[in-house]
Image (spheres, helix red, strand yellow):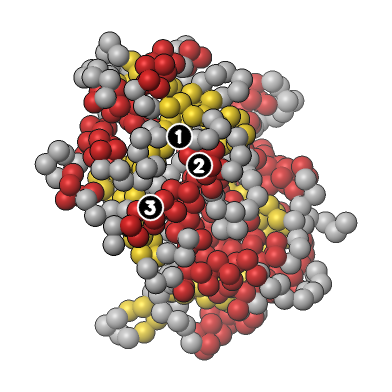
Amino acid sequence: MADTKYIFVTGGVVSSLGKGIVAASLGKLLQARGFNVALQKFDPYINIDPGTLNPYEHGECYVTEDGHEADLDLGHYERFLNAPTSRANNITTGRIYQNVIRKERKGEYLGKTVQVVPHITDEIKRNVKLLGQKQQYDFVITEIGGTVGDIESLPFLESVRQLKWELGQNCLCVHLTYVPYIAAAGEVKTKPTQHSVKQLQEVGIQPDILVLRTEHKLQPEILKKVALFCNVSPDSVVQSVDVPTIYEVPLVLQSQHMDETVLRKVGLKLGPVPEMRQWHDFLEMKHSATETVTIALVGKYVELQDAYKSIDESLLQAAIYNRKKLNLISIHSEKVTDDNVTSLLGEVDGIVIAPGFGARGVEGKLVALKYARENNIPTLGICLGMQCMVIEYARNVLGYADANTTEIEPKTEHKVIDLMDEQKTVTDMGGSMRLGAYDCTLRKGSKLAAAYGREQIRERHRHRFEFNSRYREELEKAGMLCVGENPDTGLVEAVEVPGCRWYVGVQFHPEYNSTVVNPNPLFMAFMGEAIKTKNESK
Ligand code: GLN
């Protein structure tokens, strides 16, 4: 078997250019050619993982099967490659230092002075290669977070420089930059790209391939100019022009033969151009959809573009597979009141109540849920969303006005959602929730079992609080059924109200497990029900 090839994806000029999407798209194209591909993200911040960062800082926190709180780019990797990632696919500066300091305390450096170079850089290099060694991957694509020129990126770039030197042809650097359009001059400008490449060259890295992000299609002479000024061959400059959906990016890159350029540079045979049938079918379904389905997402971070990334993508995938255009309306949970709920939710076909932490916006979620339940609107509650379903039912159906989660009201009498026993002694905040994939047994005949088409499922979790089983019987008698249970602990993982047309809450996060070729069954069922509701009301 040939050696593993390592590709680094760096970014320049500005952040938020979509390095993760470019890395995932290149991974997809190589995977479609039959290669075994792994994608990983290195983040230069000092947090051990993004689990302790709030969405204003870092967008969504993604969760892997093995319970790692990860950068949201790992979500893109999974959605594109349809393969699970793990703790090993997301490394931060914090983790690198933690490992090095642990080794230092054990005396493993044998009296040497521990330094950024070589000890931190060696640890970075070890982690880059670890993934390739664990499973024989043909390609390991490593995205370096941040922007070239940031002080904190330097040890990562030094590691890339060393690896390029050590691995020779088995290592490539893809650099993503931005080409702005200056409206007043009516021109696109390549100077920022040239400067950004210079910055890379200053730390000893000559990029092999440049990807130019642009809002306007670039003419061939612009690409040629960039190639000439940046020391790359003309076939190695590709453009990534804005497209209506991220899922078109692989095809945009394929049409410019980026995957072939990569293969040529690492000395692998080209082989036939992959058909990517499923991918094309998916986009074809998207393009041909004419009717819309309107879904409201109720959450406290809806103004942030990336806070509910995986939910947004899961809904989009489910809408596309149901051959509908998705009209996703974001509703700020803090703004929902009894007075405006009808005008906010009266016209929607389905409602998703978002996950979350803390009290802010919870009362609005409860108002939205009461309205959804009483007006028979298909509703999916996720994690805190499910917990709110239980609170709302306990308050308005069981009549316990003080019913709450102890996350918000620790002293309330009716603690329908309570801290799990094993959480009561937890003091460290990072990585200490119930995290990762757990088995769940679904009740025969439930809407949930119908959605999944089976009774044994496995989905990912991220929470500390839990349905309080003491209320199980009472809620069941009153019409809220506990339809999902952890087979090992008996914890209630899902509820539904059969009296409503589709009112389902899950303690787990189905959105972490929905990909382009494999949309999550729960989102599919929810979307199907929303569409049926819409059609009936016509
Ligand atoms: N805050 C809740 C808990 O910790 C729900 C978490 C979530 O929605 N992810 O249990």
- Residue topped by disc 3: 530
Q: Secondary structure at mark 3?
A: helix
Q: Amino acid at mark 3?
A: Ala
| Label 2 residue SS | helix
In-image side of 62 versus 478 (left or right): right
| Precedes in sequence: disc 2 or disc 3 | 2
Image quadrant where one finds the C terminus = bottom left
- Identify the residue at the far right of this view: 1
Residue 248 location (% of width, % of height): 52, 69
The residue type indicated by label 2 comes to Pro
The location of residue 384, given as percent across then percent down, is: 37, 32
| Rendered position, 509 above or below 518 | above
Where in the figure is residue 212, as x and y percent of width and height? 50, 72
Q: Along the line of sight, which residue is nearer the eye, 336 or 33?
A: 336
Three-letter residue code for mark 1: Val
428 above or below 229? above
Vertical order, 372 against 4 (above or below) = above
Q: Element type at marker 1? A: strand
Question: CA separation, marks 1 and 2?
Answer: 8 Å
Q: Which mark is residue 214?
A: none
Q: Are marks 1 and 2 in contact (CB under 8 Å)?
A: yes
Label disc, if present, on residue 506 of the rendered structure: 1
Q: What residue lies at 40% left-to-right and 22% top-to-bottom?
A: 476
Crowd around label 3: few <14 · some 14–19 · many ≥20 (10 Å): many
**Separation of residues labelled 2 and 3 (CA atoms):** 17 Å
Picture quadrant where residue 254 is located? bottom right
Residue 510: mark in rendering: 2
